[in-house]
């Protein structure tokens, strides 16, 4: 039964809409009238509501700017900022740095005798400062007071307030004497930097100091952010980076996000990337959304650096912006214009692109309100990974644990996933398995649980062998190279092969297991000469009533997702076995990345084509509980919405679905 309906023109209705915030920088010495006219014309032609003015960023950054230079900048830009606001265009400010992003061949001024940031090995930055330095804190608070005195809608704190990613430092900081002394004052633990790093990164069970140090880092950073909240109030905006990196600095997300009025999460690469990154970007934003208070306005970062269409195609930029709306944003913080002060109309296609897509983004805002939540195979994540992971190397980088490693493989094969927790069926991967407590693990083990090789090894070491169906787990021996599918229920065909070659996998991440007699063996592993070296896929119904699947390989590999027809069928059969085929899934083409969302009343399913090849055969299994779709809409790479048909689980397209395009099914 076709479900094609006219796509509404939302410009004529009073509906929730998107919001464009255009981020750029101008030369403060440029003629204010000319700047104002150009920016007003840009905002109107792009259909944007707000301009976020970058201050002292990148090519205008001379280190930590003097208060006199800040006053000059504010005075010089005030005329055109005032004009824009009078014309109905909101204005916000984004100082280009807090403690400093990187040294960038800069150093502190002679009158800036601040403690500089120090890394784990004792290297000290030239221009990046320790966030505990009282003189720097006083200086930065004064800069914020000056920004707060301006008639602006928000003041953004750049994400270099984070502790990681401070080049040329190794990982970041700060491990300086100020931090060590304050740690001693708060905890009574007296230590040197060398002793602290060695204890915190020691292999095996985490040393007691690690949690204390990460608590200390997190508390002092939040104290700083709280002091800025006292100055800026709800106008405080906060950018954030990846969850796995912040976990290695102890960030308590719920506590952090109670402080700002606005949040700008990073979730997608700054430059053009392959479609294989779509599932990772999606789960990254979904995980952050799961800890964002409803009162916080979410303006995800639509980054493009270096700027413009040569660096990131409009097609991919639009996909990033669409994904943000599907997952429930309040608007978009868009970096399409450069930070050099060039005229916006040097490349008028940017404004045309934004205006062209605006109606569709408004439609997405209405179709995907913030009340919707993703559903599907759960990908558990934890902000406690840095505290709980068992390390193998004595470097701070060993505390960075990739979250949701299954996202790529499940996305490649069309399975809907969620990063929000509470799923009945979950997929656990890698060293994240150290981060969860026994109650969480037993809950997942009593439902459906897919384990990669690393997570299975960790759960066995934690005493869960009987519940996952194995009696021993050890690194794979030499010659552990081919997985042979032996169970017809879990294979494309009996005898088909999947590579486990060490060109693709670190041998330490491949596992050889011994299994319980009652466990089901669905594949075996061969060496190069065809000799059986051990079991492969293990399926087990445990005493808690759970269905557990253990694969002998890791879910994530460093360079790309390792998928082929044989693994796609095997993995999908496993997921359907542990979930009773209750989650949404799209088939008919590689890389049909699928999302399902609901508030228990409204349902939506989105099917993306992340492959460079066009898709013209799309079948969708709806999640259990979702009625038949009332509407089916294809969104093209130009932002055009085309009503399409839906019949017996099939999407009836009028034209093939290109890369970064998507179909929305909704009730």
Image (cartoon, rainbow, N blue to C red):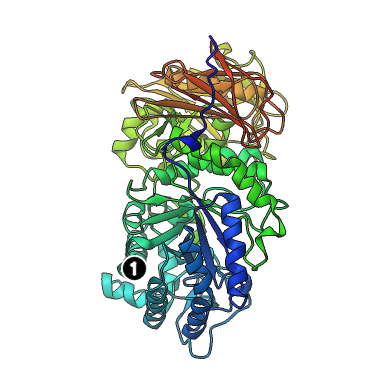
Q: Identify which residue, 353 or 553, lies in the foreground.
A: 353
Number of residue marks: 1
Task: Residue lying at the far bottom in this picture: please name it.
Answer: 110
Measuring from the top left, give residue 452's x and y in whole percent.
Answer: 51, 34
Measuring from the top left, give residue 248's x and y in whole percent.
Answer: 44, 57
Q: Secondary structure at mark 1?
A: helix
Q: Which residue is pictured at 70% across the width and 40% down the height?
A: 503
Occupied quadrant, residue 614: top right
Q: Identify which residue, 472 or 392, lies in the foreground.
A: 392
Question: On the rendered image, what quadrant is the C terminus found in?
Answer: top left
Vertical side of 347 occupied by 432: above or below = above
Q: Identify which residue, 507 or 8, lies in the foreground.
A: 8
Neighbor class of circle 1 (other Cα within 10 Å; few <14, some 14-19, many 20+) is: some
Measuring from the top left, give residue 370's x and y in whole percent.
Answer: 39, 39
> Is residue 659 visible in the rendered structure shown here?
yes
Q: Which residue is pictured at 60% across the width and 45% down the height?
A: 355
Q: Which residue is pictured at 44% across the width and 72% down the height?
A: 175
Q: Identify which residue, 203 or 380, lies in the foreground.
A: 380
Name the side, left or right, on which 25 lies relative to 252: right
Measuring from the top left, give residue 54's x and y in whole percent.
Answer: 54, 67
Occupied quadrant, residue 251: bottom left
Occupied quadrant, residue 103: bottom right
- Which residue is denoted by mark 1 in the rendering? 220
> Is residue 95 visible in the rendered structure shown here?
no
């Amino acid at each position: 039964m076709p479900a094609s309906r006219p796509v509404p023109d939302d410009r004529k209705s009073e509906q929730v809409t998107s919001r464009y915030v255009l981020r750029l920088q101008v030369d403060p010495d440029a003629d204010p009238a000319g700047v104002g006219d150009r920016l007003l014309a840009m905002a109107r032609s792009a259909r944007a509501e707000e301009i976020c003015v970058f201050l002292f960023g990148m090519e205008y950054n001379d280190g930590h700017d003097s208060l006199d230079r800040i006053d000059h900048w504010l005075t010089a830009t005030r005329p055109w900022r005032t004009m824009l606001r009078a014309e109905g265009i909101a204005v916000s400010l984004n100082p280009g740095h807090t403690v400093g992003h990187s040294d960038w061949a800069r150093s502190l001024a002679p009158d800036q005798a601040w403690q500089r940031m120090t890394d784990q090995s004792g290297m000290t930055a030239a221009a990046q400062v320790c966030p505990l330095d009282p003189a720097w804190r006083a200086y930065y608070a004064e800069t914020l007071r000056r920004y707060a005195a301006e008639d602006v809608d928000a003041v953004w704190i750049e994400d270099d307030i984070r502790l990681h990613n401070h080049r040329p430092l190794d990982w970041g900081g700060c491990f300086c004497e100020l931090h060590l002394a304050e740690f001693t004052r708060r905890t009574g633990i007296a230590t040197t930097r060398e002793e602290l790093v060695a204890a915190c990164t020691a292999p095996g069970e985490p040393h007691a100091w690690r949690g204390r140090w990460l608590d200390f880092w997190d508390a002092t950073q939040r104290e700083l952010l709280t002091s800025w909240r006292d100055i800026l109030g709800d106008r405080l905006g906060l950018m954030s980076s990846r969850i796995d990196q912040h976990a290695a600095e102890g960030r308590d997300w719920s506590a952090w996000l109670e402080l700002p009025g606005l949040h700008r999460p990073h979730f997608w690469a700054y430059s053009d990337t392959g479609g294989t990154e779509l599932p990772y970007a999606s789960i990254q934003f979904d995980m952050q959304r799961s800890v964002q208070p409803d009162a916080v306005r979410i303006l995800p970062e639509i980054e493009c650096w270096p700027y413009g269409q040569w660096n990131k195609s409009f097609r991919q930029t639009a996909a990033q912006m669409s994904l943000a709306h599907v997952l429930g944003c309040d608007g978009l913080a868009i970096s399409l214009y450069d930070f050099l002060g060039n005229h916006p109309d040097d490349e008028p296609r940017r404004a045309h692109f934004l205006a062209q897509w605006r109606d569709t983004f408004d439609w997405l805002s209405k179709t995907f309100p913030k009340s919707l939540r993703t559903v599907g195979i759960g990908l558990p994540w934890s902000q406690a990974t840095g505290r709980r992971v068992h390390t193998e190397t004595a470097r701070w980088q060993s505390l960075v644990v990739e979250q949701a490693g299954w996202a790529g493989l499940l996305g490649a094969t069309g399975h809907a996933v969620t990063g929000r927790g509470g799923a009945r069926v979950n997929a656990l991967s890698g060293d994240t398995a150290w981060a969860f407590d026994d109650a969480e693990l037993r809950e997942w083990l009593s439902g459906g649980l897919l384990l990669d090789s690393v997570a299975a090894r960790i759960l066995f070491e934690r005493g869960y062998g009987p519940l996952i169906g194995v009696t021993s787990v050890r690194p794979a021996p030499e010659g552990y190279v081919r997985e042979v599918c032996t169970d017809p229920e879990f294979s494309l065909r009996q005898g088909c092969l999947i590579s486990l070659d060490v060109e693709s996998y670190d041998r330490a991440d491949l596992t050889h297991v011994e299994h319980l007699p009652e466990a089901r063996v669905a594949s075996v592993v061969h060496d190069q000469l065809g000799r059986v070296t051990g079991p492969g896929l293990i399926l087990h119904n445990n005493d808690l009533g759970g269905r557990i699947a253990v694969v002998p390989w890791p879910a994530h590999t460093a360079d790309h997702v390792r998928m082929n027809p044989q693994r796609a069928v095997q993995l999908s059969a496993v997921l359907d076995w542990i979930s009773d085929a209750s989650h949404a899934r799209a088939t008919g083409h590689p890389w049909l990345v699928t999302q399902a969302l609901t508030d228990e009343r409204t349902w939506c399913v989105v099917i993306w084509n992340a492959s460079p090849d066009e898709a013209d055969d799309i079948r969708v299994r709806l999640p259990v509980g979702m009625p038949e779709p009332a509407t089916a809409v294809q969104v093209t790479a130009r932002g055009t919405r085309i009503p399409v048909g839906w019949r017996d689980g099939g999407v009836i397209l009028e034209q093939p679905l290109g890369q970064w395009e998507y179909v929305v099914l909704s009730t």
